[in-house]
Amino acid sequence: MSTPTRRNYNMRVYRYTVAGCGLFPFKLLAADQAWPADESQAHLIELACPTRAPRQVICLASHAHPNVTRWKEENWPVQRVNA
């Protein structure tokens, strides 16, 4: 009987910032398998709403590189990526 092979998961964490105002595009978090970098960033996402005038800069993290084009299309362009 053969033993199952262990998958090699890419454990690199990409940290990146997005900036925008209005509703935060939650669907892109799911698409990029991303999460807020810390609790304070999660709170900033909660504050992003259509009536909020100031631009928000939010730090995210993911095991995948962000889809820069899709973030830009949602008016929340990626500002910086650190791997």
Image (tube, helix red, strand yellow):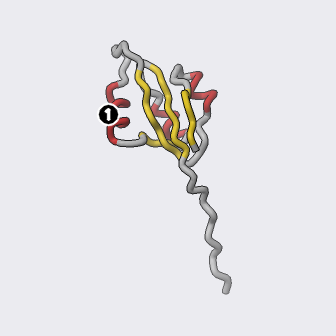
Q: Is residue 53 above or below residue 56?
A: above
Indicate the position of residue 19 as horizontal and vertical percent values. Answer: 48, 24
Q: Residue at x 64, y 81 (%)?
A: 3
Say what amino acid the circle numbered 1 marks.
His
As drawn, the residue found furthest toward the bottom would be 1
Instruction: Compare residues 53 and 27 and report the one nearer the observer.
Output: 53
Instruction: Compare residues 42 and 29 and report the one nearer the observer.
Output: 42
Q: Secondary structure at mark 1?
A: helix
Q: Assess disc 1: are there few (<14), some (14-19) or many (≥20) residues with their C-alpha within 10 Å of its C-alpha.
A: few
Q: Which quarter of the rendering shows the N terminus?
A: bottom right
Q: In which quarter of the view is residue 53 placed?
A: top left
Q: How many discs appear?
A: 1
Q: Residue at x 51, y 41 (%)?
A: 15
As drawn, the residue found furthest toward the right would be 2
Q: Which quarter of the rendering shows the C terminus?
A: top right
Q: Is residue 55 above or below residue 37?
A: above
**Disc 1 target residue:** 43
Indicate the position of residue 42 as horizontal and vertical percent values. Answer: 36, 37
